[in-house]
Image (cartoon, rainbow, N blue to C red):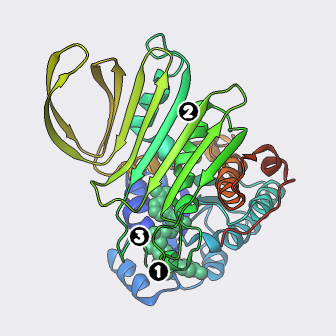
Amino acid sequence: MIRLAVIGLGAVTRNIHLPAYRRLKGRVTLVAGCDVDLATRAAMEKTGLFKRIYDSHEEMLDKAKPDVVSICTPPFLHHQQCLDALERDCHVFCEKPLAESLAHADEIILASSRCMRSVVVNSQFPNMNIYTAAKKQIGSPEFGRLLFLHAWQTFRPTADTEGGWRANMQRRLCFEFGVHVFELIRHFFDATPSTLWAHMPRPIRASNTESLNIIAMEFPDGRAASILLDRVSKGPERYLEMRLDGEHAAVHTSIGGELRFEVGLHTRQRKPFMGLHVVKGGQAVLQQAERATVIGTDGMNPFASATAVHFGNFLSAIEDGRVPSGTAEDHKATLALTLAAYDAAESRKVVAIAPYLSGAATRKDLS
Ligand SMILES: NC(=O)c1ccc[n+]([C@@H]2O[C@H](COP(=O)([O-])OP(=O)(O)OC[C@H]3O[C@@H](n4cnc5c(N)ncnc54)[C@H](O)[C@@H]3O)[C@@H](O)[C@H]2O)c1
């Protein structure tokens, strides 16, 4: 049984990690948790899920001696906490984004290799059923090659979603949410874009951070992807929609529940249509002209179920002595795209991605 400890017992631990660990019962045992906030510690003590709860991660690591440490604190703490866990011979499961700069990511990657311990980042979206189903289509006779991908979000921020440490972030939307989208784009194209262009206007003057991300990127072979993250719209919220255009068909993925009845007319064919759509946590639909086939669905908490798959794969790799997928090194390319997007928006120029991956680009902190 793998001994697991958790640093940071806030929302992501409550809503994503604990439900994920529950699914992996019998493979991990929660030996300890730690949080600097007294009320959070007290609430977690009541659940009885942790053998012991500490107020300092160093003390927890020294006394509980876990095999694996999950880091669920705000991003600006990940770098030091990853290093502290690695130095104590722990494998690390770190929440995204791994670090605030590529220099910090490099230090974590070096420490991971020096200590011979793995660091895996919880960029878990590719493990959702809907994205697994979409990925399976790529290269199939029905879909063909993936040519173009567009991803979009419309989200209405509230005091709750923007409170705490997030309130102090000047670069928030692309850094904290955009990483998920970049990770999916790299996953679907099996490649990292070669160039990127971004526009991050701030139409809400009082806002501390960007509320719109308009990003376009190109792959060396001419294929392309674009992202629109919209926190200005007062229209219906969609957490993450994605359309993958292949040579012969398209796939539309959607995260979030939906109950919709539609009746209409396909104008070109003059054919009526009717449909009832019931979606719990997410849906992937293969679209061949007007024909739509559901190819994948997710339950009410796809974030937790995907984390369970990702973390389960990590545990298997540790048990078998294999290199896991989703390591810090792999995540660095996702982080590089995020960083490049901010640089492109500031410089108003198309930026090349290669220098970010080789370390030649100016390394700026994202804080
Ligand atoms: N993978 C996902 O789907 C997903 C979803 C949400 C959040 N996240 C990520 O999870 C991380 C945490 O986000 P959150 O929403 O849980 O934030 P949160 O504020 O709800 O929780 C963070 C917790 O860390 C604690 N903390 C702060 N400093 C600490 C320290 N030095 N030692 C120990 N504990 C400390 C805080 O008291 C708080 O309880 C972020 O990196 C965020 O981007 C990932």
Residue 53, percent from left and from top: 49, 80
Task: Decide which of 178, 282 is in the foreground and name it.
Answer: 178
266 shown above or below 310 = above
Do the residues under discs 3 and 1 have CB atoms within 8 angstroms? no
Question: Looking at the image, do the residues carrying marks 1 and 2 touch, with CB atoms under 8 Å apart?
Answer: no
**Picture coordinates of residue 265 (x, y %)?**
16, 23
Q: Quickly name the residue at label 1.
A: 164
Quote the CA–CA distance across marks 3 and 1.
11 Å
183 displayed left or right of 84: left
Residue pictured at 77% horizontal, 45% vertical: 352
Using a 10 Å C-alpha cutoff, classify the residue at mark 1 as few (fewer than 14 neighbours), some (14 to 19) or many (20 or more). few
**CB at disc 1 and ligand 1 closer than 8 Å:** yes
- Residue furthest out toward the bottom: 38
Q: Which amino acid does label 3 sit on?
A: Ala
Mark 2 or mark 3, earlier in chain: 3
SS for tag 2? helix
Between 311 and 15, the one nearer to me in the picture: 15
Kindly identify which numbered label has been placed on residue 6: none
Three-letter amino acid code of the residue under disc 1: Gly
